[in-house]
Image (cartoon, rainbow, N blue to C red):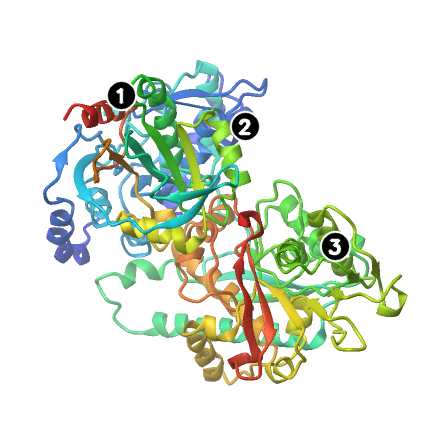
Amino acid sequence: MRFRPWLLPWLPVLFVAGCGEGRTAGPAPGEGQASSSAYTREEHSYALPEVRLLDRHGQPFAFPAGLPADRPVLLQFVFTTCGTICPILSNTFREARRELERLDPRPLLVSLSIDPEQDTPEALRDYAAGLQAGGRDWVFLTGRREDIEAVQKAFDAWHRNKMNHEPLTFLRAPGSSTWVRLNGLSSAAQLVREARGLLRP
Amino acid sequence: MSPGRRGCAAVLLALAACSPGPPAGDPERGRLLYLSGRRPDGTPLEARAQGDVPVRGADAACVRCHQRSGMGSAEGGMLVLPITGPRLAAPQEWSNQDLMRYLYREEQERAFKAKLLQMRIRPAYDRPSLIRALREGLRPDGHPLDPAMPRYRLSEEDARDLAAWLERLGAAPSPGVDEERIHFATVILPDADPGEATALLETLEAWKERRNQHVLWELQKPGHSVRFKDTLYDALRLWELHVWRLEGPPSSWPEQLTALLEEQPVFALVSGLGGPRFGWGPVQAWCEAEGLPCLFPWTALPGEEDGAWYSFWFHEGVRLEARALAVFLRQRKDLEGAAQLVGETAEERAGAAALDAALGRPLPRAARVEELPAPPRVLVAWGAALPRPGPAGPERVYATTRALTARSAAELASLPAGLFFVTPCAPDPLLEPAIRQDRVWFRNQELPLDHERLRLAAYFAARSLDNALEHLFEDFYRDFLVESIEHGTEERMTFGPFHRLSLGRDQRHAARGCFLLRPDPDAEGGLAVEEAWTVPGLAE
């Protein structure tokens, strides 16, 4: 490897920056590549804006009032043309779903598009069909760009360029206003474990 | 690509071709697996990511993460490594150009950058270790690949085919670039307005001059900085801009374009201008066949070839305006007594047909108001001419970007009430403060601001190209340019005459909605918002 003298002043900054504060470490990182293969867990209370979104059938969805208070809620920000992390995030929901449906009360899965003008209800229907996401326990939401951005900002999950969004999953227990924030990609089994943990605090 | 990498790729290819051992694999079959996640018999690739998450078919295709160019991506805080033949055949270590690309040319989380610098250096792949990576998820040194990399159920034959494709991927840079210069062309269609063509070419030429001056100034500076500039200078190229003026009927354009490309290979088409008569379809089809990127031509009738990948549009032109009009006409209860004024141009006919389709029924149409079966209450005008609303005419007239861009701000401001423009272009006040920066650039070039929206659009196209090139460094692949445009468009600070533009993987229309604007003598630019930004597919 070539010596890069211009990088030296930056190294301490960059390495320290990688260590988040107050986070619970997830599983051990994978070898070799710079991806978010390990997730970290945090808990937050978010002040969510009241906005009117649209579901994949073009029906209005009052957010956050439409999220059931008496069931667990699992929420991810995705977009249908994302090539890298969204297929894994969405397929994690899909794979975990069988186990999640056995929980009592049953969780609601929410996939909220961060590319709303591309992800019209029609595009979301196609995306959901590809994930075999029938039924009412998995909703796909889109809406006006400014409303979606307001929701992202409230969850501290907004990036000016959607292509730089992070893999995040948010979980809320029944009757709680606290959200568990998973930073990074999890396996389906890990996600199910996190959801069970909501019901057995 | 460095000469070392090129040499490694050549050796790998030669070994693959000459090896008397196992068969070399079928690169075309490998290409299909790479791009579609399917075998020639249609069976999907199957894999597991993150340990237990099944992915299959298109979701499991290599192209999803590593992209068509094989140059990978940096999305969602995840770095997907380049897997072109030259890159695989060399140890994976970061060149200064790679580091600049990921650390400073992207908006990435600091944690991502820290991880990037901690990455373990990977030894070079050879054919057996590449097959092992594909089938078992192990690097040449035996370390497992990242859990996000799917673990595939691949037969030995599948893996050989994929390896054969990967070894060829990116083996040579694309045409149109040499050690000093990079060539681009701008296509002017025969029906383009001469005044608009002058405005567009002046803008592009000024950009090129200014940019090349800057490059020469940088290169001639004595004593390059040791911090980074010396590592970037290798990637700098002077722009050459060629103007390709087409003549005659559209059926003759492909032959003209092929001759022009043979005479002077170019890396991409930038901007460009069409009029109302023909539309950009034949140029798009030719670009697809050539694999030549075409960035943001100014046309109201973009091509609509299924699965086209190389052409980027600002928007869908009259087809978008038609769908937005259908929403506005319904919302404003202006369908009763509505008719369309449709001339003979392809643009007008396409707009009218798209409006009929969006409404689910045809509106009466004629080339002149007097030819309509009954005097219309509401008139949709698809051409540049503007029938005036009033007691002797229709109550309201809806026109499009074509009529809008044919008039100065003063002319627009003086138009009568009852006239509306459906357009993806934003009114001036909504473009503040970005438009001021752009206007300063034009003033500094001593360029006029006639045809301002067109000039701003051409300026955006040129800057987008420049920004995407900065991301390429010396990896001069046309496919990588396309991917960089997809990735970076949303990061621009100004968007020409548009409020905001956005793209993504396989997205080709950067604006997906329209405003409804009305003349307003008190508003800057002569136009005010009558109906807010409306995306037809999102209208309830």
- Secondary structure under the numbered disc 2 in the rendered image: helix
- Residue carrying label 1: A189
- Residue carrying label 3: B350
- Residue carrying label 2: B32
Vertical side of B355 occupied by B397: above or below: below
Nearest-to-viewer mark from 2 and 3: 3
Instruction: Determine crowd level at label 1: few under 14, some 14-19, many 20+ residues with C-alpha closer than 10 A.
Output: some
Instruction: Determine crowd level at label 3: few under 14, some 14-19, many 20+ residues with C-alpha closer than 10 A.
Output: many
- Secondary structure under the numbered disc 1 in the rendered image: helix
Residue B392 visible in the current orientation = yes
Residue B355 on image: x %, y %: 71, 53
Query: What is the spatial separation of the Cα atoms under label 2 and label 3, in whole angstroms?
Result: 35 Å
Task: Compare residues A82 and B91 and report the one nearer the observer.
Answer: A82
Query: What is the spatial separation of the Cα atoms under label 3 and label 1, in whole angstroms?
Result: 52 Å
Task: Compare residues B492 and A41 and report the one nearer the observer.
Answer: A41
Residue B252 on image: x %, y %: 79, 54
The quadrant where residue B444 appears:
bottom left
Check the residue under mark 2 and report the chain it is in. B
Is B194 on the left-hand or right-hand side of B225? right
Residue A107 on image: x %, y %: 31, 27
